[in-house]
Image (cartoon, grey):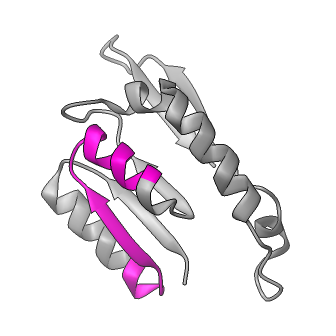
Amino acid sequence: MRTVLIVEDDAAMLRGLKDNFEAKGYYTLTAVDGKQGLEAAMREKPDLILLDIMLPELNGYEVCSLRDIDQLVDSLRKKVEPDPDGPQCLHRIPNIGYKFEPPPSGGQGTECGG
């Protein structure tokens, strides 16, 4: 069974994501701040990590900038095994992409995709 780690400090959003992934057959792990999320990611090595940006303790940017994350991504790439029944696009090694765009208010925002 594939494992998803959801790192989200908003209880309603966390519950909604957790419920939706579990309904699709994924095993879910959760964390409510960046520090817990990083610890869970390093310990459990999930197949997918959903990481909020605005988090207490360590925010999403800080988590992504740590050396531990590079080691984790390398180990995740090594454990990826294609699902012969899955879509062809899922047979590739996963990646994480993000870009920064200023929102209309002039602050800083981000758009992510994998």
Q: Is residue 100 left or right of residue 96?
A: left
- Foreground residue among 71 and 109: 71
Q: Residue at x 31, y 30 (%)?
A: 59
Question: Residue 84: horizontal and vertical position, in percent?
Answer: 83, 85
How many circles with numbers are drawn on the protein?
0
Residue at image location 79% in from the left, 89% down from the top: 85
Question: Which residue, as the protein is rendered here, is positioned at the far front?
Answer: 43
* Quarter occupied by the N terminus: bottom right
- Residue farthest left in this picture: 11
- Residue 7 x/y as whole percent: 32, 51
Residue 47 vs 49, above or below: the answer is below
Task: Kindly identify the residue that appears in the image at 55 percent across and 77 percent down.
Answer: 2
In this view of the protein, which residue sits in the foreground, 13 or 84? Answer: 84
Residue 94 in the image: above or below residue 73: below
Q: Is residue 85 left or right of residue 79?
A: right
Q: Is residue 86 highlighted in magenta?
A: no
Question: Image point 42% across, 79% down: which residue?
Answer: 27
Q: x, y percentage for residue 52?
A: 35, 42
Q: Quadrant of residue 112?
A: top right
Q: Which residues are magenta?
A: 21-42
Indicate whether 46 appears above or below 18: above
**Residue 62: horizontal and vertical position, in percent?**
39, 25
